[in-house]
Image (tube, grey):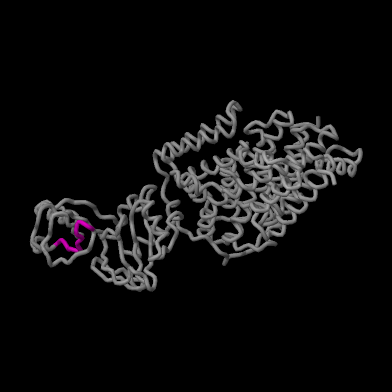
Amino acid sequence: MSDAVIVLIILVAAVGLFVLNRLSVGLVAVLTALALLATGVIDVPTALAGFGDPVVIFIATLFVVSEGLQASGITSWAGRTLTEKAGTRRAPLLVAIMVLSGAVSALITPNGAAAALVPVVATAARRARIAASYLLIPTAFAASAGALLTLSGSPVNILVHEASLEAGGGGFGFFEFALVGLPLLVVTVAVAALFGTLLPDRGKGALVGDLGGHLSTLIEHYALDQGFFRLRVVGALPATALAAHPEVEVVGMQDPGGHPCTLERDFRDGDVLVVTGEPEAVQGAAAALGLVVDTAPLTRETRSALLNQEVGLAEIVVPPRSTVVGRVCFPGMVMGKVTVLGISRMGRDVGARRVELVEGDSLLLHGTWPAVTALAQEDEVLVVDAPELLRRQAPPRGAPAIWTVVVLVGMVVMLASGRVAPAVAGLIAAAALVALRVVTPARVYRSISWQTLLLIGALIPLSVAVRDSGAADMIASWMVGLVGDGHPLLLLLAVFMLTALLGQFISNAATVLVVMPIALAVGADAGISVQTMLMTVAVSGAASLLTPIATPANMIVMGPGGYRFGDYWRLGSLTMVAWLVVGMLLIPVIWGYR
């Protein structure tokens, strides 16, 4: 049995496993590489070469840049601003969201755009009083189209660019994809606007919570009107020291170790008194008694201090059998690294008083984001809303937001100039974001989709095997023979359909890695230019519009939109036909057949 036949058998088996979806795509990719190695089609260095490929490194850096845009608040701010200006009418709102999705995708890939915009779209849908299902599939489709606006828009673009360089085609410019990508985005928006009635009404789907007004809700629920002061005792004072200041109410006291203590004993050096009252009265009493104001009130009047990119809020609930049950607590008390702003029992704020916590009590806590986020890992409390989702509602940080924009522009300039390798440009941008503290090393590791990198790295050997074993030439000869001496456009159409069909069931990156050597072999047999063949592969590889498993972006919107498997093909099929027409009309004209 020839190597070409072995490769084709392994290829069919891999596609079958992808379609069955019984194993993770990463595991299927690794098994594919191991099968090629076990059959002797490739050697060990070739089987492992994909994991060190510059393409994989560049894709990893794009995830970091995407995290920087989100961490600095730029993505959330841009989304809210645009949707607010678009109003609540369905058509203008749909167009605005799709344009935003396409633009964001061009910068941070379709998957990053979909993940970043789902909360924005859910919020916009609620404000417009329409089902989010009317907006989320178009958001994913626009993200797929927007990926074809820049070289860094998608891993597929990087793959075809590198393949073009290797095949002697000269590669593609940073914005060269937009020659066909921009018309594709326009027709994608047009199809959604004209045929949006094909989308289902899933008004009761699993919508992502609208946290846009969450801060106001918390302020009202916990009655954050007057707030509290934390006064540190210097020296010693009698327990009756504040009796001369009746306008100042003592809520509680903590000793230097942070433990709550009785108000009957004298105040000692290092104790912290939690008091409430009018600011003038509290400050006057503190001055008279030599107390140091450690913390000023956080109220509805200090919204920016309650929630920004440095500090935030978390609402927790005391679950049954928790060790927290029975613990003395009061507003203004510091618990570890967070401060209690309010306590609610049976849906009512308990006010400025000491209580023993019981099952079902809810507490509003305030602190730095690392401290607030750490609460989600605690076993003794339940976090109501994910702190990370609430953090995205914070306005962009000044300096970090500016630095993120500078770094992004710098990366685009490096890529557009063609003088810096994409992997190097991406590494410079990622390192700069960490050095400037826009993102932390821990968030860098969390932001990278390791499954995507594993998938691409493990399938690169399959692409090499399809090319070098002669399998690509076999398929190419069959396709050329099937088309005969017809117009070269028929070959482009055949490549488009083959790529698009595979792309509905396996990832577009995996599809492109498999189809590229076939397309290049077809082009060589028919005398069609490398650029034309590979751009056809790029466009058809991005046309993953018929199923939720076609791309992660499609899958990301499935739950929030309440979609079913069969909800995608109605609008997706019309959109794909539009892509096919635009691609077949423009690609040969722009890049030529020869």
Viewed as shown, does residue 29 lie left or right of 490? left
Q: Residue 45: where, in percent of width, then height?
A: 67, 38
Q: Is residue 424 above or below residue 381?
A: above
Q: Quadrant of the rendered structure where residue 584 is?
A: top right
Can residue 168 be found in the magenta stretch?
A: no
Q: Is residue 551 above or below residue 152?
A: below
Count of marks overlaid on the render: 0
Q: Residue 249: where, in percent of width, then height?
A: 17, 63
Q: Residue 451: where, in percent of width, then height?
A: 60, 50
- The C terminus sits in image quarter: top right
Viewed as shown, does residue 89 lie left or right of 337? right
Q: Residue 483: where, in percent of width, then height?
A: 89, 42
The residue at 67%/35% (across/down) is: 161
The residue at 85%/37% (across/down) is: 488
The residue at 87%/38% (across/down) is: 487
Q: Please state which of residues 200 and 497 is positioned toward the viewer in this rendering.
A: 497
Q: Is residue 312 above or below residue 105?
A: below
Whether residue 477 is visible here, answered yes or no, is: yes
Whether residue 187 is visible here, answered yes or no, is: no
**Residue located farthest toward the right when viewing the structure as drawn:** 485
Q: Please state which of residues 55 and 176 is positioned toward the viewer in this rendering.
A: 55
Viewed as shown, does residue 584 lie left or right of 370? right
**Residue located farthest toward the top when viewing the structure as drawn:** 419
Q: Magenta stretch: give its range.
A: 247-257
Can residue 251 be found in the magenta stretch?
A: yes
Q: Quadrant of the rendered structure where residue 412 is?
A: top right
Q: Is residue 403 above or below residue 26?
A: above
